[in-house]
Amino acid sequence: MSTKPTSKPSLAVPGEITETPDQQGAYPRLSDAQIAALTGHGHRRGSQPGEILFGEGERDCDFYVVLAGHVASVEGHGTHEERIISVHGRGRFLGELSLLAGQGSFYTAMALDAGEVLALSVARLRELIARDPAFGDLVLRAYLLRRSILIGLGAGLRVVGSRYSPDTRRVRDFAARNRIPVRWLDLETDPAAEAMLAQFGVTPDDTPIVVVYGRLLRNPGNAELAAAIGLPAPSAQQAGSDMLVVGAGPAGLSAAVYAASEGMQVTALDGVATGGQAGTSSRIENYLGFPSGISGAELADRAVLQAEKFGARFAVPAEATAIAQESGCYRVNLADGTSLTSTSVVIATGARYRRLDVPRLDDFEKESVYYAASQAEALMCRGDPVAIIGGGNSAGQAAIFLSAHATRITLVVREHDLSEHMSRYLIDQVTRLPNVQVMVDSEVRELHGDQALEAITVVGTPTGTRRVLPARALFVFIGAVPCTGWLGGLVDLDDHGFVRTGAGALAAVGGPDGTGPLPLETNRPGVFAVGDVRSGSAKRVAAAVGEGAMAIRLAFERTRPT
Ligand SMILES: Cc1cc2nc3c(=O)[nH]c(=O)nc-3n(C[C@H](O)[C@H](O)[C@H](O)COP(=O)(O)OP(=O)(O)OC[C@H]3O[C@@H](n4cnc5c(N)ncnc54)[C@H](O)[C@@H]3O)c2cc1C
């Protein structure tokens, strides 16, 4: 570990330094016994006022515990945007999720006064997390909460771009799906946007620009942005593995965890982000073992760390574009030209949400139409009236979550009764919300607005009555189409494009013992399909996770018959 040069503290530090209060476990204090146990794994040293322990953008920095004095997490250190995010005293540890995820730090850690710290390498931290469940859970929980706090504060990347620019929306969506904290400066309304363009000597024509750890990127593609943040690139993956998992939603993450924990060499790819559809869910309340629910983002982050602990490798963004059978293995081609081979493949590419069939959708889609309702979308429609289309569980969840952010919500449901597709526990909550109006037997027929959506026309289907209702955003949850285009003709699909498995797969596999496909196996030996992409699947997180785990057991059966 190297001691960073001492910089004069540019921050106006008050005479008496106040620690940031703990927020539901985000900033816990280690006990003397815990500190004593850690001491043998690192080394203690003094820290000076203004000393930088790690800087913004730095990767693989040490894990620090404050033994004496105070350390601040500072965003934009040394710039005119400098702000203190949190202050920590004795017994608190530093860092957040980026430390374990191999991403650059989103802030600088700076000693505020003379003190002492204990420093451990990140490799040692990983070992301790794996070895000591209580300590591991304390750190993981704190790191996940700190990431949520950063996202809420908009501390991290800076995106400057117009709300009417599709590329601005793409960049923001990519960051949101990957749970990367971002502050968006809207060129149309935010005076700070102009100032930032001037600071970097660029014009509005160059937007969107992204400032990543002080470095300027002009309209970066998703792969360029991923590389700048430190997401795992496909090129870093080994070309061959025992198990290739395509799609890293709940089903793929589960397959990755179980394959790696069984000693398989596993690579998991995702075209957008780990977490899949579930990663966009604000609260999953029906997943076993979480009586008060868990956010999809937390579930995904925990699963990724768990899979990596067992040795699984991830590649994001890595979109599979084709698959072919070669002698004794399968080859999967990726959009960036990389190709990977594997003995077995798990298809876990899920489904993509269906678009609404209504005139002028294209006019508003990039700016005002959403297919997920997470914290990122909530920030965009805060204080506005919104409409949610759909009568299933995802529409119900969205209504509950957005009701805390939007002024008024119209839930437009085609069916006669919410209970046709929505679980009872969600119906009970939705119908109790004072700012949610449920319109059953109804369809959206028109969208109104100039550049951005302003209102929708809803038609009551039995009577033909038309109502124009204010809506600045449209959230669409009307079913899904499977992501199976990349499979070419390699595996059998059903009439709706979902992958057939087991007895439902048409052609006989012709395995070593001459039997047909195993459960979850396609008509190709060693190629399995799990989760929402599979024909007849339950379209639930728990089912997807169960299938991911089961596919690994079956893959062993296929490749190593007893
Ligand atoms: C808003 C919302 C709320 C929900 N709430 C709940 C809930 O409370 N309870 C519940 O049980 N279920 C819920 N669901 C449903 C649940 O999320 C899905 O059933 C589950 O995510 C399916 O998991 P999966 O892994 O099969 O697919 P997905 O989650 O769809 O993941 C598939 C992944 O594959 C990737 N991918 C697609 N094509 C490619 C390609 N060519 N190359 C590489 N990667 C690719 C995608 O980017 C995606 O990340 C919700 C869904 C939504 C949208």
Image: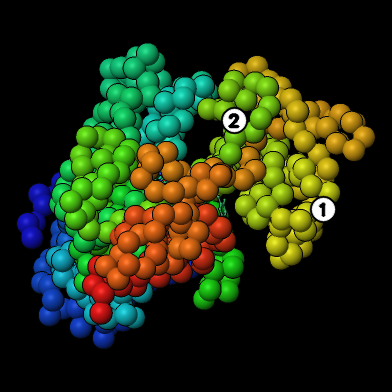
Residue 461 in percent (x, y) is at 85, 36
Would you say the beta carbon of the disc 1 residue lies within 8 angstroms of ligand 1?
no
Which kind of residue does numbered mark 1 sit on? Asp
Front-most of residues 287 and 51: 287
Q: From the viewer's perspective, is residue 364 above or below residue 247?
A: above
Q: Which residue is mark 2?
A: 368
Q: Which residue is mark 1?
A: 417
Single out the residue that lies furthest toward the left.
Answer: 2
Out of 437 and 439, give the one closest to the viewer: 439
Residue type, mark 2 in image = Ser
Q: Position of residue 74 (x, y in %)?
A: 31, 48
Q: For numbered disc 1, what is the local secondary structure? A: loop
Label 2 lies in ligand 1 vicinity (Cβ under 8 Å): no
Q: Nearer the viewer, residue 395 or 265?
A: 265
Residue at figure coordinates x 71%, y 57% from the top left? 422
The quarter of the rendered structure image containing the C terminus is bottom left
* Alpha carbon separation for disc pair 2 and 1: 27 Å
- Please provide percent x and percent y for residue 12: 32, 46
- Which of labels 2 and 1 is toward the front? 1
Q: For the point 76% across and 44% down, which residue is it?
A: 413
Residue 39 vs residue 218: left or right? left
Indicate left or right for 33 with 253 as reference: left
Neighbours of disc 1 within 10 Å: few (<14), some (14-19), many (20+): few
Residue 21 lies, with reference to residue 314, above or below; the image says: below
Identify the residue at image location x=47%, y=47%. 493
Quarter occupied by residue 94? bottom left
Labels 2 and 1: the sequence-earlier one: 2
